[in-house]
Structures are given as structure tokens and as C-alpha cells.
Image: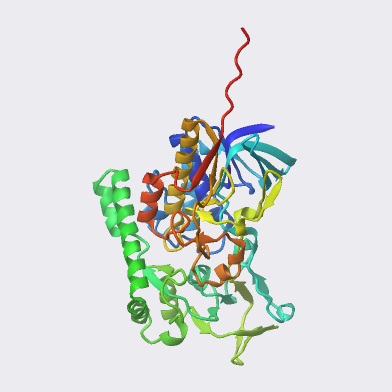
Amino acid sequence: MEHFDVLVVGAGISGIGAGYYLQSQSPDRTYAILEGRSQLGGTWDLFRYPGIRSDSDMYTLGYSFKPWTDAKAIADGPSILAYLKETAAQYGIDKHIRYSTHVKKAVWSTEDARWTVEADTADGPVTLTCNFLFMCSGYYNYAKGHSPDFAGVEDFAGRIVHPQFWPQDLDYSGKKVVVIGSGATAVTLVPAMADQTASITMLQRSPTYIVARPAEDKMANWLRRKLPAKLAYGLTRWRNVLFGMFFFNQARKYPAKAKERIIDMVRAELPDYDIETHFTPRYNPWDQRLCLVPDGDLFRAIRDGKADVVTDTIERFVPEGILLKSGKTLPADIVVTATGLELQLLSDVQFSVDGEVKDLSRTMNYKGMMYSGIPNLASSFGYTNASWTLKADLTCAYVCRLLNTMRRRGLRQATPQPTAPVGEQPFLDFTSGYVQRSIDKFPRQGDRKPWRVHQNYIRDLMALKYGSVDDEMAFSNPAPKPAKKAA
């Protein structure tokens, strides 16, 4: 049975980052990355729909240690995947990845101070052991997207596709297309397909905040021409972090003003459109994530008459398209259900500690990455109000701090445990449908540190890079002393 100091689950942005930090900050540890799919890249390998791109700028979605050097700040999926592959190859992380290895179960033994991990592979089940388990498997189900049960789908004469499983043989040229949804995927698909379709409609139940941003960052590109790549990248990264935090905090502090400003920007893009109906949400900015459209491509497609937006509710599918509650029928040859993700906690791996199966939804989240009462287990979960990688970088570095502390003290177990009462709150405070559908699957967060999940990079940087690792963390399980040699 193979043993590693650390097993990382998932070879996407977080998992590749974990490999880098383990090599650079805990180089005396052995590790392997277990990836359930046949390729690295996670989200950026899975999603293949037209126009797939980041909705965060690449100066913050990129790694702190690997400058993003392409001209576009809002990058397409293939470019991001190439960046991840280049990173993995450059640092030799790819040599540690075990592909088509789907983890199903993890069993902790206090006596042995190790996890026994069971996984399925193409060649049958395998078992490995490790001292520390780092889950970098994302937050949604890769095998299943969210698909509402629409009445009459069996009557529809056209084709229905979900963006998570985009068929490569789908020919939409000259076709009438309806995209159901108003989130990041929908606002990406519509302008990407609009030039080839006969018509394309974004059908939404309610509007989302949509903000246009230049695809290229002129200041970042200028800095890169004048300064060394790492320095230019670092300056741009910090500028974007601080601007994003400022905008988020102002929006939360003055929601009415933020809403007015965003809607005014949309009105400037679409002066003759019904902005009140189609682009004015019922909630405040950042109650849900904002949608980003590079160079205002969605607005341009609408202005050019290549796309439109309908705000209504679906009554049922009919042979020729979709019948709406208003009585109107939207004709369609193809319907794209951009209806969201199905959230999943740690790939639904079954965890047990000393023979007791643990329900992680009943635990308290520690520093946004560990779980009360569960030893030597961490997970990577990004920000809801900023890029995923900002938090992933901090999490990976903190895991290495924890590992190094345990080795230095000769202790083998680190278990988050509250030392005083903690009030419980939901893990995420977003009102988005995909969050509310699945929030009960996730652990709770507390009303005080270190159990409070801050959506704030500066606070997390100070807490995770410089804060005490002893803060309500129980270190235990001394390493056995080597047996004395016989005289």
C-alpha cells in the first residue's frame, strides 16, 4: 500500500497550486495528486461551451507565483487551461498527478495518525494512505449539472443541451436558440453564439447585475512592457485586489447608490432598451455574484439586433419551442439550459474518524478551510466576491505552515476545536439559487474568528500568513520515538 505525507484530491487550479506550495514550502514531504478525470484543469478542462472564459481578471485568477503574461485580462477557457498545464509542467507538478483516480472514502485512524483513502480507477479500486488529506476538488458536481424539471420537454421537437456537457457535434448555425438563465454562463454563451445563429434569446426569470469591463487591461500591459514580469504582475494583482475590495465594500455599505450606478452603466450601453424589466434585479449588488461581460459583448449583440432578452416564466415546452406564462411562445430549434451547477461538498467523499462516519454539514468551518473535530483535513474554497485563486493561494500556504508546525513539534495530529461557544451561521450568505438549493450540504460558519469565513483578502492574508496556528487548534498525537538499537 502506497503512503504519502500528503494526498491532494483534484488537479484543477487549487490542486496544482497545492503541488507548488508543498514543493516550495514543505519540500521534505512526499505528495500525490489524485484526479478523478483523465486530464488536469478541473473546470477549465470540463467546460467546452462556446465563449467559455473567466469571470475574474487573470491577474487575480492566476497564481501569485506564476505571472499571467497574455494581453487579455479576461481570458478564454483554452488559454486558462494552457496556463495551468504550463504551470504544472514548469514546476514538475504534473509528475505527481494520478489520473482517473476517483476518491470515494477516507478513514482516519488516531492510533496510526493517518488517513486510509479508497479510490476507484480504470484498473479497479486502489487504497493509499497519507498523514494529511487536502481536498482541492472544487464545490460542484462534475457529473451532473442543475436541470429543473420543465413540463413538456418530451414534446419539444428540437435539441436540449446543458452547458456543462456541451456536445462537440452541435451545429447551431442558422438555428433559433433559446438560452435559459441569466448568470455567468448565459451572458457568455449569448454573444459567443450570436454571430452564427438565426436568432438567440436569453430567457430569464429575473435579471442579474451585469457589468462591462475591458477584455484587456491597458495599464497592466503597459507595466509589463516597462517592468520585469513578476513586478508588473504583482503591482497589477494588488491594484485589482484593492479595487475589487473597495467596490465590494462600497456596494455593501451603499447598496442603493451601487445599484443606481450599475443600472446607469447598462442604460448607457442600451439607451433604447427596457432596462427596468430586463436589467434591474430585485436584490442588492453582491447579494449574488455580479456577471462580467468583456468589452460589453452582450450589450453589443443586443444593440446589433443579433440577440435579445426575455424576462418571463416558463409554462411548458411545446413542439416548436417554449410557452411562457405570458402566453407568448419562443420558437427554438435548440434550448440551452444554463440553469446552474449542483453544489457538492468535497466530491461527496465519505469521511470517518476512528470508526465513526462524519457528516461534515454538521461541523463548523475553521478559517474557511478545515472542519471542527476532523483531524488533518483541509479543503480549498475560493471567494464569492473575488477570484477563486486568491483564497486558494492563502489556503495552500497555510496548510504548509500547519504541516511544518506539526513536524517541528513532533506532533502528528491537528484538530480544530472550539474552546468557547460559537454562534452558527450559514457557510455562504449568497441568495443565488444554486447556493440556496444546496446550502444544507455545507458546514456552518461561526460568528467569531477563527470560525468566521471572511470574504476579505486582506483580513485572510493577515490571519493565514501571520496569525497564530494555535488559535483553537488542538495539536496532539506525539510521533513515536525510534526504537533503541540493541547493544
In this rendering, would 396 be left or right of 481?
left
Residue 436 in percent (x, y) is at 57, 70
Foreground of the two, 18 or 176: 18
In this rendering, would 245 be left or right of 25?
left
Foreground of the two, 445 or 248: 445
Which quadrant: the N terminus? top right
Which quadrant: the C terminus? top right
Q: Residue furthest bottom?
A: 327
Indicate whether 121 appears above or below 210.
above
Residue 132 in percent (x, y) is at 57, 40
Indicate whether 34 appears above or below 245.
above
Indicate whether 272 appears above or below 57.
below
Q: Is residue 177 visible?
A: yes
Q: Is residue 274 visible?
A: no
Q: Residue furthest front?
A: 420
Residue 191 in percent (x, y) is at 48, 71
Q: Residue at x 50, y 58 (%)?
A: 421
Q: Residue at x 34, y 72 (%)?
A: 253
Question: Where on the picture, by quarter, is residue 162?
Answer: bottom right
Foreground of the two, 434 or 480: 480
Residue 418 in percent (x, y) is at 51, 52
In this rendering, would 106 be left or right of 265?
right
